């Protein structure tokens, strides 16, 4: 069972890394929206493709307040919640299996 515990711990560590990287992607997307970036730039297109599906869903429920789009902040808070809930839960499951 220790191998399965190590596997779950590895998944928790990978998930923690992916969620942290996604937070930085959201921040980069927000910063790019402040400047007039070239929409045909591959980096800009990647940032839009990765973040727009979730941001568009959030924008349906969160109004734009005074010209400020709060959807990136809501998404970051959601990712932090997932990070603080899922990762420790997976690590505790892994510790129980070792």
Image (cartoon, helix red, strand yellow):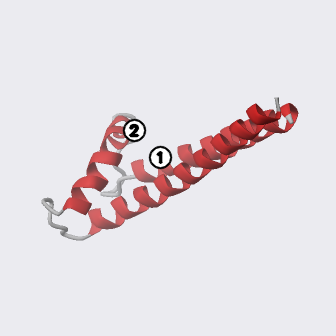
List x then y, in percent, for residue 63: 36, 43
- How far apart marks 1 and 2 lie (CA) works out to 8 Å
List x then y, in percent, for residue 25: 41, 58
Residue at figure coordinates x 40%, y 41% from the top left: 62
Residue 91 picture quarter: top right
Residue 97 picture quarter: top right
In the rendered image, which residue does mark 2 sit on? 58
Q: Residue furthest bottom?
A: 35
Residue at figure coordinates x 65%, y 49% from the top left: 13
Discs 1, 2 touching: Cβ within 8 Å: yes
Quadrant of the frame with the C terminus: top right
Looking at the image, tell me whether mark 1 or mark 2 is earlier in sequence order: 2
Helix, strand or loop under label 2: helix
Answer left or right for 46 relative to 84: left
Residue at figure coordinates x 27%, y 54% from the top left: 46
Binning the other alpha carbons within 10 Å of mark 2 as few (below 14), some (14 to 19) or many (20 upward) gives some
Binning the other alpha carbons within 10 Å of mark 1 as few (below 14), some (14 to 19) or many (20 upward) gives some
In the rendered image, which residue does mark 1 sit on? 75
Quadrant of the frame with the N terminus: top right
């Amino acid at each position: 069972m220790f191998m399965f515990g190590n596997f779950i711990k590895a998944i928790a560590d990978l998930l923690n890394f992916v969620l942290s990287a996604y937070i930085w992607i959201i921040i980069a997307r927000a910063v790019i929206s402040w400047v007039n970036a070239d929409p045909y730039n591959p980096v800009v297109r990647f940032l839009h493709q990765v973040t727009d599906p979730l941001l568009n869903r959030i924008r349906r429920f969160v109004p734009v307040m005074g010209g400020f789009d709060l959807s990136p902040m809501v998404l970051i808070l959601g990712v932090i919640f997932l990070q603080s809930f899922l990762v420790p839960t997976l690590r505790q499951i892994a510790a129980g299996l070792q």
